[in-house]
Amino acid sequence: SALSKPADITSVTHHCRRAKSLERTRRMTKLALASSFFALVVVVGGSFAFAPAPESTLRRPTTLGTSTTATKTGSFTSEGAKQQIGNDSFLNENLMARAQNGPGKKNEESLKIGIIGAGLAGMVAAMDLADAGHQVEMFEVRPFVGGKVSSWQDKEGNHIEMGLHVFFGCYYNLFGIMKRTGGFDKNLRIKEHIHTFVNEGGRLGSLDFKFPIGAPVSGLQAFAKTEQLEINDKVANAVRLGTSPIVRALVDFDGGMDMVRELDDISFTEWFTQLGGGRGSLDRMWDAIAYALGFLDCDNISARAMLTIFMLFAIRTEASVLRMLDGSPQTGLHDPIIKYLEDRNVKINLSSPCRDIVHDVNEEGFPTRVRGIKVGAKDQFREFDVVVAACDVPGIKKVLPDDFRKYKEFDNIYNLDTVPIATVQLRFDGWVTELNDDIRMMDVSGDQSDGRGAGIDNLLYSVDTEFSCFADLALTSPGEYYKEGEGSLIQAVFDERATSRSNEQLVEDCIAQLQNIFPSSRKLTCTWSSVVKLGQSLYREKPGQDKFRPTQATPIPNFFLAGSYTYQDYLDSMEGATRSGLMVADEIIARADGPTGLKAFSEEGNLVAA
């Protein structure tokens, strides 16, 4: 446990809480005023109004949602970690500043900290821990950093990625980290505030959020005007969204969010069809969004996962604004973080897998203390005061010793599953997404860098392909993906429906499906291709999984977890990974000092061992 706060700090904390309370009141007043429009607006031809159904008519499955959140919040020591959990985290406008400014504290004691994994979560944790005065060393099994956000170059200089990485406007923590490392302004390209669906034959649909009035009105009119749904599907859509927790949240945010949390045990389809939602809306719009979020369709993704995103869209205008890197993740995201870490003497060991976590056990065989890790081909023992396992789901399952599963918190991890994906990159001798001008589509002459090529410069969705989201990186991220004299570089992510096929077949299928939705692209030739398969990618956000996600602090006092699968109020994503990294750092910093702190715990253990 950490030392008690001095009286002057407690006083400051009370002032901060009053300020936050006033800000929350201001925000809720704004939402309440907006909700009157949301509840009464005419959606189709002036004839249908949103109206929340009585709560008694809604199916409320028995889950651990709200109580689980309270329990997990109670397991944190630091105020910083607590601010990332619970309903307040969705209204907290200070999260970006916290990530940008760092922990704001230097510990009296300096800990030797070993971090297993150099993905986004591990690197973010290392940033804060180094700034707090600790000696940090990282160990990564791959020859590059980044985890699921990794990228690298092949022998010809082509940048290869593990997935399509899009930055939602509600990535407040990640944006704060990028501002802290100097990468936000120069490495991100903001996109037009519209989500575009490309259908068979080149027919476009959209959710156009551009509107003089912000959320929730901008989102409401986007759904009302979308060309992606027929009128009867719009009506069914309006019925279900009008009876959703989102409407309640506009006047009672806590009540709405509690309802969302309680929906983790049912699928989005089950929730959507309970009170009016139709199959047409699911098939023609929601499935593409579900696949883009978690590589699962609406029949298999948790209602909580989907509604969490919709809640953010409803309360924050900027949440649905998209950004993409001006180049590869390695250059635009990771390199600035690596420089930040190296400037603070953090050592990153690549191609250095963790072979074992060395630990003590008590008389009952329960692990009580971690002493260090064995790494590399020779199982070299490295001693640390604290160890952080910043892994993904398959990684943490491999690295945890068997006796750790005596604790329920670790054993629960083995209930989490993952989804396989395949990322296909195709380069063409013209501009695939140009639908209106064949001459412009074929023109690759001159310098068309900085997004000046023809076509659609944005993330794209489709329900008529096996890749639900895709983009032309030569347009969206031209810094390293545009090549003079060449055209589109399409990056498409296939879900598990296609991952068992050969790489050659996936390339053929991707080209054929592109030609189905962009008929004019049949005149173009694919000049280069790449396929990267991940047998285990994001954790599977199917119903009932949220309760199995572990907190960053564990029953072993000097052993911590990080990674986007760990408990935080966001999805398995770049923002989720960033949140977890900040949370684990806050916990270690809060517990480091004092007679019962982590340093004292380590020294006591060394004395016992001696």
Image (spheres, helix red, strand yellow):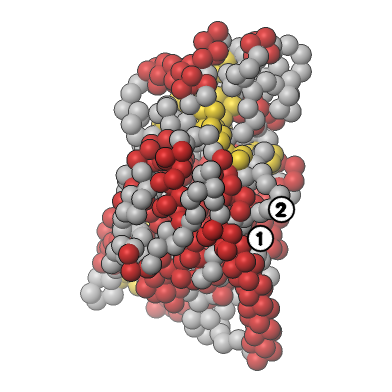
Q: Quadrant of residue 155?
A: top right
Q: Are marks 2 and 1 in contact (CB under 8 Å)?
A: yes
Q: Which residue is painted at 54% across and 14% down in the image?
A: 521
Q: Residue at x 57, y 87 (%)?
A: 4
Dot 2 falls on a residue whose secondary structure is helix
Tell me which residue sits at (33%, 31%) in the image.
497
Counting residues from the start of the chain, the first of labels 2 and 1 encountered is: 1
What residue is drawn where x is 67% and y is 88%? 11
Q: Residue furthest left?
A: 364
Residues at marks 2 and 1, CA–CA distance in whole angstroms: 9 Å
Q: Which label sits in the foreground, 2 or 1?
A: 1
Above/below status of 180 relative to 149: below
Seen in the picture, residue 594 relative to 262 is either above or below; the reply is: below
Which SS class for mark 1?
A: helix
Residue 388 on image: x %, y %: 47, 60
**Position in image of residue 129 (x %, y %):** 60, 64
| Disc marking residue 479 | none
Q: Quick check: 297 left or right of 203?
A: left
Q: Name the residue furthest bottom.
A: 7
What is the x, y in percent for residue 185? 75, 46
Amino acid found under the numbered disc labelled 2:
Lys
The residue carrying pointer 2 sits among few (fewer than 14), some (14 to 19) or many (20 or more) residues within 10 Å by Cα, namely: some
Q: Amino acid at mark 1?
A: Met
Depth check: give the residue in front, 271 or 588: 271
Residue 603 in view here: no
Depicted 384 relative to depicted 351: above or below: below
Q: Is residue 366 visible?
A: yes
Per the image, the residue denoted by label 2 is 179
Name the residue tied to disc 1: 96
